[in-house]
């Protein structure tokens, strides 16, 4: 939190009745720009990338002024050294995967190339796809190629606009794992737009909360998401908790235990070995909340937790709970009323081990 | 009477020269109309398409007024070149270009509009300037539709008659293209002499339209593939 900002921006724009009025900074690591749809997240990214020109403001990247209305500076997108990964990948359909990845690489002068493209290809497991035409790829493959293409140009910051919006749950876990690798191994700062709480929790070091064209908060994702009533969680669709963990033990039947932070989960670990890093995914609606420790259940997971926050919307309630790691549980408003749930109280979480999907963190 | 072959060659020269102007100008205009906010866009499109609805005789008359030695443009051309443009093969090429232009431009507009803007923007963020994006992304993706537009315009230029006869006359060996020669021979009651030229005309037109339709079918299937690819 103490390091210098990579990117600072202060943007003011009016677009067809909508007012964008936001200022923030992004630091090394992953900064999530989190908020409901229509809050101005994509417009903010478009301003930073130079695709959309704000009415007033400044954008500074590593000390370089990219935009300044006062100084009449507007650097064109191709000179900004900002990578952009779009929702749908936006690959060049008439080129192979390899030509897509090399496109930006060949335009970057040698002195600016900081990324080893072979390493990116290896990290994202793209070797088998290199000769394939881009238009023949599946959704998850397209996003991995888009990511590699953006990274190969050695950007100073990477913008990601809901790169997983069009992927199903299983693929999302895999792409999250790839993004975590990129964060760990390449050290390129990322600004990550999402309206998914779970993605934000799984990826971001810091989160900016955006509402109605303004950035209203900046904090650690767990604090921001657990302690502020966001009021738009229902927009995330089926909420899924994505957590990183480690296989603690694995039985011969494929049943085993995964350590997530200080908590231990019973989960189907398959043929994985003890000590393997994994991502686990738990659907928010799979989690049952109890106010007393339940006994005599067939469900294997019963965890003590603190209820941090409750968000009610259209008959549904979203409970942000803390088991040493933040989790979201989905229940009904009437259940909240019957149990007289209030923020701050001790609760117990119950879910079957089969509700925990175990995904590879280092996708092999 | 010039040989059939020289008439065909003259027609190809006139139509080819017309397309050399139509293609770059048409691509530029279509790109501006699709990708930039052009003031007065609506009226520009009306003006561009006007020759489609106008009788070519009127276009010929307008060109004659413009290129004749009494107009400033014609005067300037005469002073610079030392000769008139009206009633030369160049005038025939200009007439063909004007009638072919709307057909090509309309096809180019459709071709550019099918190119995903986000894909072009992605290329910009990867370090490509606007010209590089145009030549490496836009043009290759729009290419089947563009080629279809070129062929449609070329087919129209080949068959041009009304504007040509007014602004370029019907001078054998100089401005007498296929359609003018056929008209001349039929008017003289020399139907049998016209048959060869009619055969060439039909063959050229059929070939142009066939290739055009083939490319258009390919272009739409490419768009379908792309849409299907992004859904997967």
Image (tube, rainbow, N blue to C red):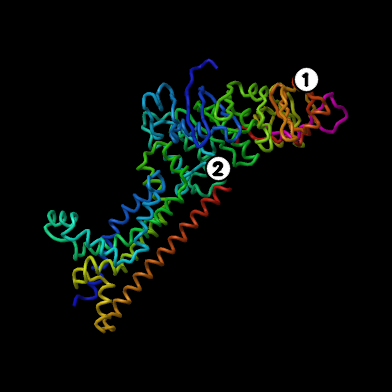
Question: In this view of the protein, can residue A364 be seen by the observer?
Answer: no
Where residue A20 sits in the image (x, y, percent)?
Answer: 51, 30
Give x and y (percent) for residue A45.
50, 32
Quadrant hosting residue A110 = top left
Magenta segment boundaries in residue numbering: A280-299
Same chain check for tags 2 and 1? yes
Which circle marks residue A141 in the picture? 2
The label on residue A309 is none
Question: Is there any visible trace of residue B89 in the rendered image?
Answer: yes
Question: Horizontal and vertical percent for residue A204?
Answer: 59, 26
Q: Nearer the viewer, residue B72 or A48?
A: B72
Numbered disc in front, either 2 or 1 = 1
User: Is A289 a magenta residue?
Assistant: yes
Q: Is residue B204 above or below residue B42?
A: below
Q: Residue furthest top?
A: A2
Q: Residue at x 62, y 40 (%)?
A: A171
Residue at 26 percent across and 73 percent down: it is B180
Please determine whether, in this image, residue B64 is positioned above or below residue A249: below
Left or right: where B21 falls relative to A26? left
Q: Secondary structure at mark 2?
A: helix
Residue behind mark 1: A345
């Amino acid at each position: 939190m103490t390091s210098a900002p990579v990117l600072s921006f202060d943007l003011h724009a009016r677009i067809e009745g909508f007012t964008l009025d936001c200022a923030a900074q992004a630091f090394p690591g992953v900064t999530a720009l989190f908020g409901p749809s229509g809050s101005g997240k994509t417009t903010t990214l478009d301003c930073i990338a130079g695709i959309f020109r704000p009415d007033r403001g400044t954008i500074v990247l590593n000390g370089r002024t990219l935009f300044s209305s006062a100084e009449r500076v507007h650097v064109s997108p191709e000179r900004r050294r900002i990578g952009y990964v779009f929702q749908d990948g936006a690959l060049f359909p008439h080129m192979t995967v390899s030509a897509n990845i090399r496109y930006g690489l060949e335009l970057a002068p040698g002195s600016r190339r900081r990324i080893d493209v072979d390493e990116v290809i290896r990290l994202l497991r793209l070797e088998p796809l290199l000769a394939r035409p881009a238009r023949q790829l599946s959704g998850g493959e397209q996003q991995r190629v888009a990511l590699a293409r953006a990274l190969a140009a050695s950007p100073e910051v990477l913008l990601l606009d809901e790169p997983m919006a069009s992927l199903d749950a299983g693929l999302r876990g895999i792409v999250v794992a790839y993004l975590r690798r990129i964060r760990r191994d390449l050290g390129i700062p990322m600004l990550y737009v999402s309206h998914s709480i779970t993605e934000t929790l799984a990826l971001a070091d810091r989160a900016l909360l955006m509402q109605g064209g303004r950035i209203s908060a900046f904090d650690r994702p767990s604090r921001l998401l657990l302690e502020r009533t966001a009021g738009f969680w229902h927009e995330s669709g089926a909420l899924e908790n994505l957590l990183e963990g480690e296989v603690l033990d694995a039985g011969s039947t494929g049943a085993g235990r995964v350590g997530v932070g200080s908590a231990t989960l019973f989960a189907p670990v398959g043929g994985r070995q003890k000590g393997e890093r994994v991502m686990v995914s738990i659907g928010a609606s799979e989690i049952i909340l109890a106010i007393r420790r339940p006994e005599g259940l067939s469900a294997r997971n019963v965890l003590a937790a603190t209820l941090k926050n409750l968000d009610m919307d259209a008959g549904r309630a979203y409970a942000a709970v803390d088991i040493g790691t933040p989790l979201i549980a989905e229940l009904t408003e009437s259940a909240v009323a019957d149990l007289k749930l209030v923020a701050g109280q001790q609760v117990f979480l119950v879910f079957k081990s089969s509700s925990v999907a175990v995904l590879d963190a280092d996708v092999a | 009477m010039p040989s059939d072959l020289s008439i065909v060659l003259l027609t190809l020269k006139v139509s080819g020269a017309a397309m050399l102007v139509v293609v770059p100008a048409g691509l530029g205009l279509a790109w501006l109309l699709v990708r930039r906010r052009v003031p007065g866009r609506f009226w520009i499109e009306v003006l561009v398409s006007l020759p489609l609805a106008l009788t070519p005789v009127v276009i010929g008359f307008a060109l004659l007024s413009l290129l004749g030695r009494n107009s400033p443009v014609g005067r300037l051309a005469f002073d610079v070149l030392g000769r008139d443009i009206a009633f030369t093969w160049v005038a025939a090429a200009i007439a063909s270009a004007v009638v072919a232009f709307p057909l090509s431009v309309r096809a180019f507009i459709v071709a550019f509009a099918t190119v995903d803007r986000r894909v072009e923007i992605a290329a910009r963020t990867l370090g490509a300037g606007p010209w590089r994006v145009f030549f490496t992304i836009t043009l290759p993706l729009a290419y089947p539709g563009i080629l279809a537009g070129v062929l449609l315009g070329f087919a129209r230029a080949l068959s041009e008659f009304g504007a040509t006869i007014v602004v370029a006359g019907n001078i054998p060996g100089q401005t007498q293209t296929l359609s003018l020669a056929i008209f001349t021979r039929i008017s003289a009651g020399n139907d049998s002499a016209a048959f060869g030229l009619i055969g060439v005309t039909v063959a050229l037109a059929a070939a142009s339209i066939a290739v055009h339709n083939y490319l258009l079918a390919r272009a739409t299937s490419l768009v379908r593939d792309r849409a299907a690819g992004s859904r997967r």
